[in-house]
Image (cartoon, rainbow, N blue to C red):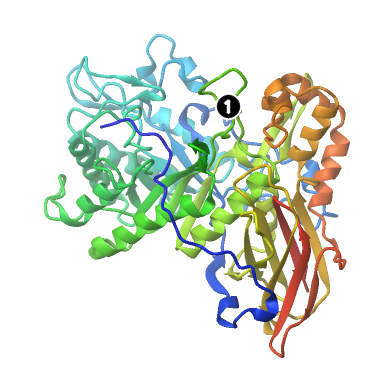
């Protein structure tokens, strides 16, 4: 296999801006597109195997986010046995992906790996005995899963079989990648016996009512040679044998391949695996067809310049590359269904701006502010429009832990703000639509809306994003909304933009206090986590002014009455209103609620 980067192939799409007035819009142009239901498709995150035993990644929900005076207080997960919230949880997550669960770890991987300083292979759940038989350390598995399942009540789990236990390759052939063992098993049939027995042990431990909710994924970005250095055939053998073991124990469990990255159509990537699962001989059971429960990919923004063109920052481009994959699988392998369209890694991995004095290294950001919220919101709406049913975020994308010598607190990011809004209107009965947005932009700014219809409310999220980070103009935007959606016209608004997002405001404060690192001083449009921008000095500064920043986030999560400067809802004709926002800034996500 070739080593892949995570930059998706760009698909050039012809598009035209809507530089027209509302009065000139045809009725068909303003039709709403049904996106499905607001049923929690965003509430997934990943935990690392070495940190499961200590539950190190679970977070305490800060009190300032749960204040009942907020319009959108954090919705804590509740233990059904006690009726009380869990002490800790993964923020904005009901479903978890557990990676590197069965061992095969990097000896320097930290966490539980440090408990085996002499030989990290003793952390493996599955292993080969000196007599060349299979052995199991189920206590290792339960030590990792008990905190997740028993302590914090998570049953919507996807167990990821990615790193190969150290003893399963042929002796002397095991190779270390950046995350642990990457060499395929010598005999893939061993994975069948092990995965089958694992499902039996899981059921005995946690009960069928819990384990029947589990899913399984064979690998993590296995088209990347740094994670898996076997051939495509070796991967397919492992996939089929593991799937057989899981399905014989848990016949209804979703089982699917690794989350593809890079060019999804290359020989060792996801499209080729779909072809095998649809049309080729199953290595484990014979006949054609192998389980293909989902076509999942990683989705990262990795902006960079190609000449003078900026690529890797457009939500339309990254989504259209996934659409091309999903459409091709649907068209070429019609007998493969049912399978789901999913994103198993989602985020931003840097900026396009070079660090001072470097020809290769860029100024880092995970885009925690308003820009990142708008960028991700646009992406989510496009994904939903193309049938995506699940998106997994990272914990660092929804909050940042700020610490001093005595205490710490999670501070909400822009994406965390957006998910706070989503959480308050989620439900299997809440329909969501994409509504056409009419705008005044002449500088490439894009606009996306999502309308949710919970009982007796209309919730309108509208966002402005420009892939060129220094374009901050305000724009006049409008949309037509059916009057039948409205039970009342009393409007309120909550705003996320560069004046209200925590990371944007604290960046300005750190600059004023002369606490920013030089690369951030020199690039005023790049916002990052506080620690990246200013190190421990920044954390101490925030903790010293914590009340101000908690109130800032609280204010952004509190609806206030709509003013004409914010938006107006007026008659368009007998069946529609027109909602007009005269000064929507870039970047931003605003929530307008009518009830």
Mark yes or no: residue 290 visible. no
- Is 38 on the left or on the right of 87, as rendered? left
Where the N terminus falls, by quadrant?
Answer: top left
Residue shown at 85% from the left, 28% from the top:
512
Please indicate whether residue 230 sits to the left or right of residue 281 in the image.
right
Q: Nearer the viewer, residue 444 or 34?
A: 444
The C terminus: image quadrant? bottom right
Q: Label 1 neighbourhood size at 10 Å, few (<14), some (14-19), many (20+)?
A: some
Instruction: Please identify the quarter of the rendering in which residue 505 is found.
Output: top right
Residue nearest the observer in this picture, 374 or 419 = 374
Q: Please provide percent x and percent y for residue 135.
A: 27, 26
Residue 13 shows in the view? yes
**Residue 158 horizontal/vertical position (percent):** 43, 45
Q: Position of residue 297 (x, y in %)?
A: 41, 47
Q: Which sits in the foreground, 180 or 381? A: 381
Q: Nearer the viewer, residue 251 or 263?
A: 263
Q: Is residue 284 above or below residue 329?
A: above
Read off the residue under disc 1. 354
């Amino acid at each position: 296999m070739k080593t892949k980067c995570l930059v998706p192939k760009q698909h050039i799409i012809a598009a035209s801006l809507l530089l027209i007035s509302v009065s000139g819009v045809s009725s068909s142009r303003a039709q709403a597109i049904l996106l499905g239901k607001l049923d929690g498709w965003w509430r997934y995150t990943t935990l690392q195997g070495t940190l499961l035993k200590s539950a190190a990644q679970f977070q305490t929900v800060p009190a300032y986010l749960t204040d009942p005076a907020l319009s959108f207080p954090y919705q804590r997960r509740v233990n059904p046995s006690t009726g009380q919230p869990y002490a800790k949880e993964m923020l904005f997550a009901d479903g978890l992906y557990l990676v590197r669960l069965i061992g095969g770890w990097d000896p320097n991987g930290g966490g539980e790996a440090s408990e085996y300083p002499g030989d990290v292979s003793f952390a493996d759940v599955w292993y080969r005995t000196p007599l060349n038989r299979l052995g199991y350390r189920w206590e290792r598995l339960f030590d990792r899963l008990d905190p997740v399942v028993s302590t914090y009540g998570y049953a919507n789990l996807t167990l990821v079989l990615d790193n190969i236990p150290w003893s399963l390759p042929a002796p002397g052939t095991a190779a270390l990648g950046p995350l642990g063992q990457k060499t395929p098993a010598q005999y893939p049939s061993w994975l069948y016996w092990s995965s089958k027995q694992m499902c039996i042990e899981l059921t005995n431990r946690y009960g069928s009512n819990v384990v029947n909710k589990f899913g399984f994924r064979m690998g993590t970005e296995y088209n990347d040679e740094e994670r898996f250095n076997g051939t495509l055939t070796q991967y397919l053998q492992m996939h089929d044998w593991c799937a057989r073991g899981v399905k014989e124990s848990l016949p209804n469990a979703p089982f699917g391949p690794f989350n593809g990255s890079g060019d999804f159509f290359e020989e060792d990537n996801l499209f080729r695996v779909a072809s095998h699962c649809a049309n080729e001989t199953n290595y484990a059971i014979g006949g054609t067809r192998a389980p293909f429960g989902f076509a999942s990919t990683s989705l990262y923004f990795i902006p960079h310049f190609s000449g003078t063109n900026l690529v890797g920052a457009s939500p339309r481009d990254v989504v259209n590359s996934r659409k091309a994959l999903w459409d091709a699988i649907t068209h070429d392998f019609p007998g493969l269904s049912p399978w789901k369209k999913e994103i198993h890694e989602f985020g931003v991995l840097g900026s396009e701006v070079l660090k001072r004095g470097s020809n290769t290294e860029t100024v880092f950001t995970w885009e925690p502010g308003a820009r990142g919220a708008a960028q991700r919101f646009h992406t989510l709406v496009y994904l939903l429009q193309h049938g995506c049913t699940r998106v997994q975020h990272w914990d660092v994308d929804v909050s940042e832990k700020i610490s001093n010598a005595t205490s710490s607190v999670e501070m909400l990011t822009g994406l965390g703000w957006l998910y706070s809004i989503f959480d308050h209107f989620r439900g299997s009965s809440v329909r969501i639509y994409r509504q056409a947005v009419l705008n005044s932009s002449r500088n490439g700014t894009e606009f996306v809306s999502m309308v949710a219809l919970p009982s007796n409310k209309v919730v309108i999220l509208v966002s402005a994003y420009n892939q060129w980070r220094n374009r901050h103009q305000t724009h006049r935007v409008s949309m037509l909304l059916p009057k039948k959606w409205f039970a009342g016209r009393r409007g309120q608004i909550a705003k996320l933009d560069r004046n209200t997002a925590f990371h944007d405001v604290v960046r300005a404060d750190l600059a004023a206090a002369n606490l920013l690192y030089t690369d951030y001083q020199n690039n005023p449009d790049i916002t990052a986590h506080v620690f990246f921008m200013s190190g421990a000095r920044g954390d101490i500064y925030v903790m010293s002014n914590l009340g101000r920043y908690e109130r800032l986030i609280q204010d952004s999560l509190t609806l206030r009455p709509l003013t004409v400067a914010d938006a107006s809802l007026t008659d368009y004709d007998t069946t529609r209103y027109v909602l007009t926002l005269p000064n929507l800034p870039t970047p931003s996500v605003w929530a307008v609620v009518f009830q």
